[in-house]
Amino acid sequence: MKIVVCLKQVPETNDVTIDPVTHNLDRRGLAGVMNPFDKNAIELALNLKDSRDDVQVVLLTMGPDDYAESLREGMAMGADEGVLLSDRAFAGADTLATGYVLAQAVKKIGDADLILFGRQAVDADTGQVGPIVAEFLHQPQITYAANLRLSGANEVTAERLLEDTKQTLVAQLPAVVSVRSELNTPRYPTPRNIQLSFNKPLTTWHHDDLDLDDSRLGQAGSPTIVTKVYAPEPVKRELTPLTGTPSEAASQLITALKQRQLI
Amino acid sequence: MPATTAAAAKLLLQMVDDYTQREISPYDMSMDAAQDFPKGFVDKLTKTGFLGIMLPQEFGGAGFGPEVTATVLNHIARGNASTAVTLEGHFKTIDQILKYGTPALQQALLPTANDRIFAFSMTEASGGSNPMGISSTATREGDHWVINGDKIMITNGGLAQVYCVLVKTAPDELSVFVVDQDMPGFSFGKREDFIGLRGTPVGEIVMDHIVVDNDHLLGKLGDGGVIGDSAHDDARILMGAVLTGIMEHELKISTDYAKERKAGNTPLTDLQVTHRKVADMAMRKETTKLLYQRAAQLKAAGQPYSEEAAMAKAHGSRAAVSAGDDALQILAGYGYSREYPVEHLIRDARAMEIAEGTVEKMRSAIAKAEFTK
């Protein structure tokens, strides 16, 4: 069984700035760390690997050369190999263009039974790339899985936690799953596994290593246009103090809520 | 440092910082108050592979070198010095088995050092800094040795399962044997009630007619003094690292507080009296860091490092006590309160003016080294 875990490297700090030209996050020069939610996806893959002898875990990411550090960290957690997609042609990609390149890379990796994602990246917070990859691969997808098990030779069952309900979904493999952080507690890489991770294969694929439609790459392949990024002004609301005894205050509150047709 | 080693060290320190922040720092105050590690704490530390950081890969460890190992303790000590000192006691003991153990002894013991804590025991009621004053003996009886004696003030005493013990094999001959807590005749005595580093168990072992084969001898007969000195040297580098971590902790508490607190209408950060203290703390921290890193670099390069290790500990221990005193003064009443960690950091640092050789002994060693130049 081959599991591909897609991950992202994000700025280590919350103190990021916005590029005044592109209005995107300006990640230049910022130290990066693995997106914390992606560790839950790696942990799920490693749990499956721990429970079976035939599981191979491949990590996949797209970004500059230093994104290899996050791949190495995942390999130190226990993944078998890493693939970095790095090329100037991929730069400036939105979620659609990113998902396209990742999907093409998953095809090249070949025979992936399960493609896992963290629930979203903590820098852009979209949670879109997993579903986009599923669409490009024409595979079933389960998003926000709070638990997951292999329920048959070629089948996975996951429980989704939605706002006010739980949903149990069964998908045929191969499938794409994004996981919630409640799913597990990611393991720490041990010092020994950190050292041994440098003996594991880490491959970089550039533009020419993949079968790509150039019109779908980078900024040219990104339909998202960020026109403005701003912090919303706080809404100033009129405060009406409740006065009198508790009983009187409760009456005032009920009256106010009725006037606003809230009850 | 080779690129792969540097990259692995970066990843390791990232993990250590994350682990320290989540799993160690939250217990810093409670360890001091309870005079113990929290339940399950050592098991978690073991499971995460901390015990094997400097153990060569052939024995199942990670095989990080002296510089990285010391830096790891520096980072852990930012969160809790007791945890770092427990690892220091373990690592210095492993170091001596690597330096002086026969291949057979190494093969028998070192793979277990990934999940068993080791300790080096020299001090007795009759002798600490003067090793010839000890009373413990190993007496040859046929083809084996019989060990008798009491060892006190052992870092990790009561926690460790394997002990390197300094004994007399003749009236003027010191040797080191390795004993295991499971051996008949081995028992634990009292635990010390020290004022600092209270998370680290420091205790007594009693050896009553422990019978060991000759293969439990570390080095050769009569190597005890040399091995003891070597253990001190290795420990002093690591203590310099721990002291640097304590000072980083003291500095952070002080600067965080100064950034929020005002004296009248003046922020503490605008007062020259604060500047002087914070600058002194930073310089003490940085000089100690440079000293321990220099000693670790020399050790990694296979060059003599005894003098530099003594400097790291002698300078660092007084520096950390002084920096703690400055931190206490910056926090004033809060610094004097047990609700803040400053007072226990001073107590923690003070231990290292004594442990692994007093600062007075360090200065003698440094001076003697200078006289020979």
Image (tube, coloured by chain):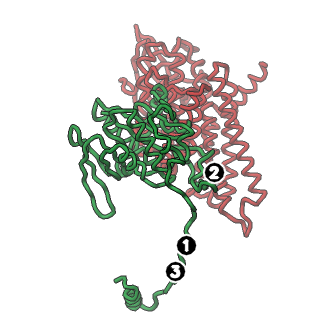
Per the image, label 3 sits on a secondary structure element best described as: loop
Say which chain is green: A
Instruction: Sort mark 3 into few (<14), some (14-19) or many (20+) by Cα contacts within 10 Å.
Output: few
Residues indicated by labels 2 and 3 sit on the same polypeptide chain = no
Asked if the residue under mark 1 is in contact with the one under mark 2, i.e. CB atoms within 8 Å, the reply is: no
Residues indicated by labels 2 and 1 sit on the same polypeptide chain = no
For this view, does A250 lie left or right of residue B126? Answer: left
Per the image, label 2 sits on a secondary structure element best described as: helix
Apparent colour of chain B: red
Residue type at tag 1: Pro
User: Residue A76 is drawn in which quadrant?
Assistant: top left
List x then y, in percent, for residue A85: 49, 37
Residue B252 badge = 2
Residue A234 badge = 1
Quote the CA–CA distance across marks 2 and 3. Answer: 40 Å
Residue type at tag 3: Arg
Q: Chain of mark 1?
A: A
Q: Chain of mark 3?
A: A
- Which residue is depicted at the point 53% across and 45% down? A218
Taking B77 as reference, is A239 above or below it?
A: below
